[in-house]
Amino acid sequence: MTTLTEEYGRVSMHGVRREVLERQAELAGLPVAAVGISAGASNAEYERAFLSAALRAKAEWGISRIVFGDLFLEDVRAYRERLLDGTGIEPVFPLWGRPTASLAREMIAGGLRAELVCVDPARLPAEFAGRSWDASLLADLPAGVDPCGENGEFHTCVTAGPMFSEPIAVRRGERVLRDGFVFFDLFLEGELPGRQAAC
């Protein structure tokens, strides 16, 4: 289940193109439940769209749990728990409380490959957008920046890992500043860039 900004056809906040998301799902052998929201959606709009998609997944696919990758932000976890309260869908947090420095190294050693596709320049220099999330990047992170980006310092797009049947071939696009964030565009190999819509 992934939130997509409808006007742009991109994963909300990350700016990842829908085609890349669909390729990730294909290689992981999973369906995509796209939660469409408008650009600049209010929290109320997000909640309505999320709950509608969650209840549809429960009715159509028998979904009884939603797994979140949250690591340590208590307010975010409490928000998700409140959002799903009374739906009959259990929120699950398998990574909760894991030390992020060792978790990042473990994921990289396990074959996970990702690119930084969104950077908050108030927390991390803009030049980090487009870099690979690897041991070199971890070593270069300024003090106080979480190695998993848990405080919103950055967002990634995963292009390889043990969950995929093969790596995702991507081409690198341009780095742009929009709405106070620095985005780095990725295209599927062989795809034409198309419009350079805002993220």
Image: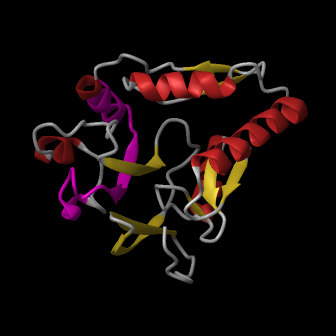
Residue drawn at point x = 58 percent, y = 19 percent: 92
User: What span is colored magenta in the figure?
Assistant: 103-128
Decide which of 43, 122 is in the foreground and name it. 43
Position above or below: 156 against 138: below
Q: Is residue 32 visible?
A: no
Q: Position of residue 14 (x, y in %)?
A: 46, 56
Q: Is residue 83 visible?
A: yes
Number of residue marks = 0
Position above or below: 50 against 77: below
Residue drawn at point x = 45 percent, y = 67 percent: 186
Position above or below: 60 against 17: above
Q: Is residue 114 left or right of residue 21?
A: left
Decide which of 112, 37 is in the foreground and name it. 37
Q: Is residue 134 magenta?
A: no
User: Which image quarter holds the N terminus?
Assistant: top right
Q: Is residue 120 magenta?
A: yes
